[in-house]
Amino acid sequence: MAQIIHVLIGVGVGLAVVTIISLFISCVSRLDTDEIAIPYNIITKNLRREVKTTGLHFGSPGFTLITFPSVFTSMEFDDISCLNKDGVSISLDVIFQFRADPNYLYDIVMQFKDFSGYKQILAATGQGAVHDTCAHFNTTAFQSMRGFFQVKLLDKMKESLSPFYAILRDLQVNDVRRPSDFETAVKDKEAAKENIKIAENERPKLLTQARTEYQKALKQAQIIQERADTDSTIIRNQADAEAQAIRARYSTETDTYVELKNKMRFNVESLLTYMAVRVVGTSKNDIYINLKSPAQVKYEL
């Protein structure tokens, strides 16, 4: 009987030791260097305001720690879509770094329970900030003013997350993607701009070439005009000289025939007969004329 009592006492002591050890272990929590926490008792439902940092922490039975990162944590929005000022759907990747403000850790836990719930509200609010900021930029600005868009988004994100006691350090916007049809239209527009710029750069050269050709044409036309004027003057002078020579010859012949007519006392018909006889007489070839005589063949002087 005594032996049974000793066994029962030993078992009881063992159970007591195990229970004490279990309670001791359950009352101890350890925080790493990148964690902070506030104590919470799951039995009494008591949440304390004291913020715990790295190390071992002890508490009463039911003691536990609700932990949060003490360093900045990255939150990513991969391939998030938003409508810009032009109503064009834009896809982009956004990454920002945040951490919970230790001074308001109690309020954060009271509202969002733990870090998982806290991240959910930050993610939903952050996406809303992305949509709001996108609506203030047109399609071209996403390419030409990406740095400014990133600054504006960071400011909007800080404004939106500040009611939740979140501290933001940095934000990055990557891989802005526009619809393929719009990208094609933009490329065509840029190509057209390049062609216009090339044409504008070529314009002075082409204008200079055109002016040079125009001046050459004017010079050539002037040369042709001067040559034509010279040739026409020469031809006109030659014609005037020939006409003058012909007039002089016929004038001499006229004077000769007038003198002959007066000297020989011919009338017009007798003079024409005389001239016909002279023509026939001076010809070296036979002449056949089937014409009436313009006057008498013989005249008495």
Image: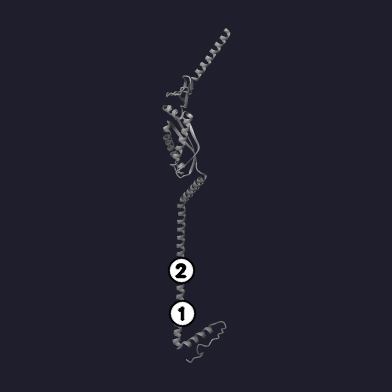
Q: Residue at x 46, y 66 (%)?
A: 228
Residue nearer the viewer, 300 or 222 = 222
Residue nearer the viewer, 109 or 212 = 109
Q: Which residue is mark 1?
A: 250
Q: CA distance from mark 1 to mark 2?
A: 26 Å
Colour approach in the figure: one colour
Give the image location of residue 172, x and y in percent: 47, 35
Give the image location of residue 55, x and y in percent: 47, 21
Give the image location of residue 73, x and y in percent: 47, 30
Name the image quarter holding residue 161. Answer: top left
The three-letter amino acid code for the residue at tag 1 is Tyr
What is the number of the mark on residue 140?
none
Dot 2 alpha-carbon crowd within 10 angstroms: few under 14, some 14 to 19, many 20 or more: few
Q: Is residue 154 above or below residue 16?
A: below
Disc 1 vs disc 2: Cβ atoms closer than 8 Å? no
Q: Residue at x 46, y 58 (%)?
A: 214
Give the image location of residue 136, x and y in percent: 43, 42
Extreme front residue here?
1
Q: Which residue is mark 2?
A: 232
Q: How many marks?
A: 2
Tell me the SS state at disc 1. helix
